[in-house]
Image (cartoon, rainbow, N blue to C red):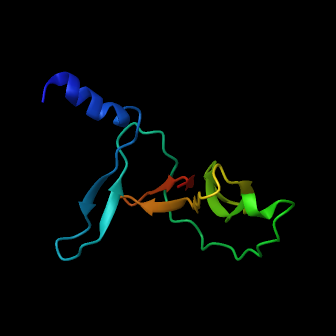
Amino acid sequence: MNWLQRSFLCAPLIGTAIVVAAPASAQTSTYTAVVPPGANVIMAPTSPPPPRDEAVPPPPGAGATLSWQPGHWEYIGGNWDWAPGRYEARPQGFSSWVPGHWQQQPDGRFAWSPGHWS
């Protein structure tokens, strides 16, 4: 494979944070994501509080095109703040929302992986 073919294969990765998996221990098959140095990622020194219970309200108006996005904890200015859930229009009728989550890193801190449509 020449350099031009390799560049086309790698083009989708440019500007994308690459997550590398590393075994948590030699005795388990659990893996922890590693955030690349310099990545624009929200980091927190501690785990977030437990999620709040939210009553999901009925969708406003045309509910068939809306999807509920559950609330989550945000780490802002050294404090945990709750971002309440909300409805959002689906980009395509078959899309589903994948909620964001906090994931512990090898150094003990927690990194935010934002929600996205799939």
Residue lying at 33% horizontally and 31% vertically, measured from the top left: 11
Camera-nearest residue between 69 and 60: 60
Residue 22 horizontal/vertical position (percent):
25, 59
Camera-nearest residue between 96 and 108: 96
Residue 112 horizontal/vertical position (percent):
51, 54
Residue lying at 39% horizontally and 42% vertically, measured from the top left: 17
Residue lying at 56% horizontally and 53% vertically, measured from the top left: 116
- Decide: is 68 above or below 2: below
- Residue closest to the far top: 4
- Residue closest to the far right: 61
Q: Is residue 90 left or right of residue 62?
A: left
Q: Is residue 102 left or right of residue 30?
A: right
Residue 51 horizontal/vertical position (percent):
63, 72
- The answer to whether any part of residue 84 appears in the image is no
**Is the N terminus in the top left, top right, bottom left or bottom right quadrant?**
top left
- Residue closest to the far left: 1
The total number of labels drawn is 0
Name which quarter of the figure residue 2 lies in.
top left
Q: Is residue 115 left or right of residue 23?
A: right
Q: Is residue 88 left or right of residue 77?
A: right
Camera-nearest residue between 43 and 98: 98
Residue 99 horizontal/vertical position (percent):
57, 62
- Decide: is 87 above or below 49: above
Name which quarter of the figure residue 49 lies in.
bottom right
- The answer to whether any part of residue 42 appears in the image is yes
